[in-house]
């Protein structure tokens, strides 16, 4: 049996979510934002950037029945949140299941999508 690491799933889920039309970005969890704020100050434009994976959380389901993926996304203005969230849910689930299939692993996957905000046109640069 091949070991599956949550860190690998972060990238797969982030890539799938960001490919969905209407997703402006992924929103990091509070713990990531606090850690970034507490980090030593760096110069340059990358100072306030976090990786897209910071908006993903992946781990074994509490009951051990498979994997649970949480996606926190910010939508582009003018999009229906329900439609985009469903699309993110479906694409992330399909991408993770495809990854498992490539490893010959059969795992149950649940995906939870939370829309944390709407980016206005001037927010997206």
Image (cartoon, helix red, strand yellow):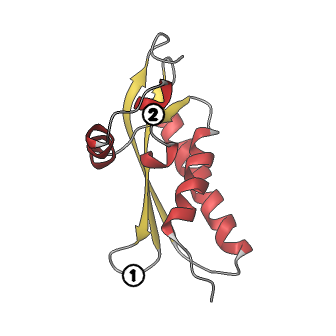
> Looking at the rendered structure, which numbered label has been put on residue 8?
none
Q: Quadrant of the C terminus?
A: top right
What element does badge 2 sit on?
Answer: loop
Disc 2 to disc 1, C-alpha distance: 34 Å
Who comes first in sequence, dot 2 or dot 1?
2
Depth check: give the residue in front, 110 or 15.
Answer: 15
Query: What residue appears at the point 49 percent right and 67 percent down from the top-left corner?
Result: 6
In the rendered image, residue 58, in percent from the top left (x then y), is placed at 44, 62
Q: Judge from the rendering whether residue 42 lies leftward or rightward of residue 18; answer left or right.
A: left
**For the residues bearing labels 2 and 1, Cβ distance under 8 angstroms:** no
| Residue most extreme to the right | 102
Query: What residue appears at the point 59 percent right and 39 percent down from the top-left corner?
Result: 18
Number of residue marks: 2
Q: Is residue 66 above or below residue 112?
A: below
Q: Judge from the rendering whether residue 122 lies leftward or rightward of residue 22; answer left or right.
A: left
- Residue 80 visible? The answer is no
| Residue most extreme to the top | 122
In the rendered image, residue 57, in percent from the top left (x then y), is placed at 41, 57
Q: Which residue is mark 2?
A: 49
Q: Which residue is mark 1?
A: 64
Q: Is residue 4 above or below residue 89?
A: below
Q: Is residue 112 above or below residue 88?
A: below
What element does badge 1 sit on?
Answer: loop
Q: Is residue 82 above or below residue 6?
A: above
């Amino acid at each position: 049996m091949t070991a599956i690491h949550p860190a690998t799933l972060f990238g797969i889920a982030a890539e799938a979510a960001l490919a969905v039309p209407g997703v402006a970005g992924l929103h990091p969890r509070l713990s990531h934002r606090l850690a970034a704020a507490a980090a030593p100050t760096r110069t340059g434009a990358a100072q306030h950037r976090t990786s897209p994976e910071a908006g993903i959380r992946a781990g074994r389901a509490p009951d051990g029945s498979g994997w649970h993926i949480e996606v926190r996304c910010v939508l582009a203005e003018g999009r229906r949140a329900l439609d985009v969230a469903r699309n993110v849910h479906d694409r992330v689930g399909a991408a993770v299941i495809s990854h498992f299939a490539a490893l010959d692993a059969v795992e149950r996957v649940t995906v939870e999508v939370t829309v944390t905000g709407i980016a206005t046109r001037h927010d997206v640069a």
